[in-house]
Image (cartoon, rainbow, N blue to C red):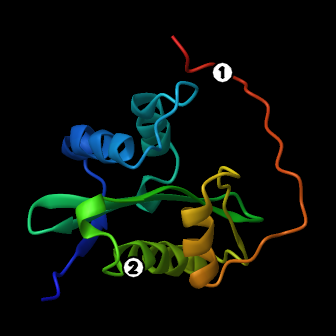
Amino acid sequence: MTTAMKIRLFQPSDTAAVIDLWKEANLVVPWNDPHRDIRRKLQTQPELFLVGCVAEELAATVMAGYEGHRGWLNYLAVAPRYRRRGFGRSMVVEAEMRLREMGCPKINIQIRAGNTGVIEFYRRIGFKSDDVVSMGKRLESDES
């Protein structure tokens, strides 16, 4: 039996369910406060913060962004009970469509090196490793 997922914009009332999903998907780390990340996203391109729902249950999320040169995907998560049904792919396809409409020529993602399952998922849907070094610099600490 195929379960239908409806993709829609994030609503503030989704916050608790989104954070629970991110925790369940091991996306929450001490240096990224999910409440702050949500507040920041709602201030910048909130139309690219998507959730997928099965009936009224939150099943998937993705945050996308575009700064005029590259698009980015963050917080792609699918609840374990809904995995292997194409929901992750559907979330990425929807984000790609919205980024294309904004004129975005390329999407970048960052994946923790040891997360081989996620790396393989992205390979299966057409992403390739770029010969780059990912670097970061914290401008604000989320750690308490």
Tag 2 secondary structure? helix
**Residue furthest out toward the bottom:** 1
Q: What quarter of the picture does the N terminus occupy?
A: bottom left
Residue 129 picture location, percent across and down? 78, 71
Q: How many numbered marks are there?
A: 2
Relative to 45, does residue 93 appear above or below in the rendering?
below
Q: Are marks 1 and 2 in contact (CB under 8 Å)?
A: no
Relative to 65, does residue 90 appear above or below in the rendering?
below
Mark 1–mark 2 distance (CA, rounded to whole Å): 33 Å
Residue 51 picture location, percent across and down? 31, 61
- Residue 98 visible from this viewpoint: yes
Task: Give the residue displayed 23% in from the left and 63% down from the top.
Answer: 81
Q: Closest to the observer: 47 or 90?
A: 90
Residue on which the image places disc 2: 90
From the viewer's perspective, is 75 left or right of 78? Answer: right
Task: Give the residue displayed 36% in from the left and 40% down from the top.
Answer: 23
Q: Closest to the observer: 90 or 114?
A: 114
- Residue type marked 2: Ser
Residue 79 picture location, percent across and down? 29, 58
Q: Which mark is residue 79?
A: none
Q: Closest to the observer: 84 or 86?
A: 84
